[in-house]
Amino acid sequence: MAQLQTSSTLTCPKCGHVETETMPTDACQYFYDCKGCSSVLKPLAGDCCVFCSYGDVPCPPIQVPAPRVIDGTAQLYAPTDTLLRLGTSGIKESNDAANGSNPLA
């Protein structure tokens, strides 16, 4: 597994100011005050935080798949819509987006 990256360089969409910031490791950051123009940045539709919208590195919660239990089976949900199933035979991938089902719905 790749090492967790905790720094991301944000680029303001309004003034173009670039700033490298340390990301929280246990939560998504919804607001960010631009140090160039004082605009309050919020995530774009579909993104969880400002780092995923305006940064060069996604936030730590997105970098690490979140464990879930579905139908009594431990699974890891990867942000790429790939579901990693953990069982006695190891990890098995299934792309639920490809077959039209969503096991998390």
Image (tube, grey):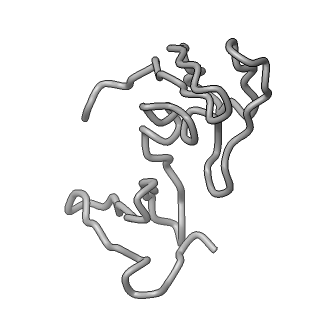
- Examine the rendered structure and indicate whether residue 28 appears above or below residue 48: above
- Examine the rendered structure and indicate whether residue 50 appears above or below residue 87: above
Residue 37 in the image, given as x and y percentages of width and height: 74, 18
Q: Quadrant of the N terminus?
A: top left
Residue 23 in the image, given as x and y percentages of width and height: 56, 20
What residue appears at the point 53 percent right and 18 percent down from the top-left corner?
18
Residue sitting at the far front: 15
What residue appears at the point 68 percent right and 14 percent down from the top-left corner?
36
On screen, residue 23 versus residue 5, left or right, reads right
For the residue pair 50 and 25, the one nearer the viewer reads as 50
Residue 87 in the image, given as x and y percentages of width and height: 31, 61
On screen, residue 18 versus residue 99, left or right, reads right
- Examine the rendered structure and indicate whether residue 1 appears above or below residue 67: above
Quarter location, residue 27 = top right
What residue appears at the point 28 percent right and 66 percent down from the top-left corner?
93
For the residue pair 8 and 76, the one nearer the viewer reads as 8
Quarter location, residue 64 = top left
Residue 38 in the image, given as x and y percentages of width and height: 78, 18
Number of marks in the rendered image = 0
Q: Quadrant of the C terminus?
A: bottom right
Residue sitting at the far left: 89
For the residue pair 39 and 30, the one nearer the viewer reads as 39
For the residue pair 39 and 96, the one nearer the viewer reads as 39
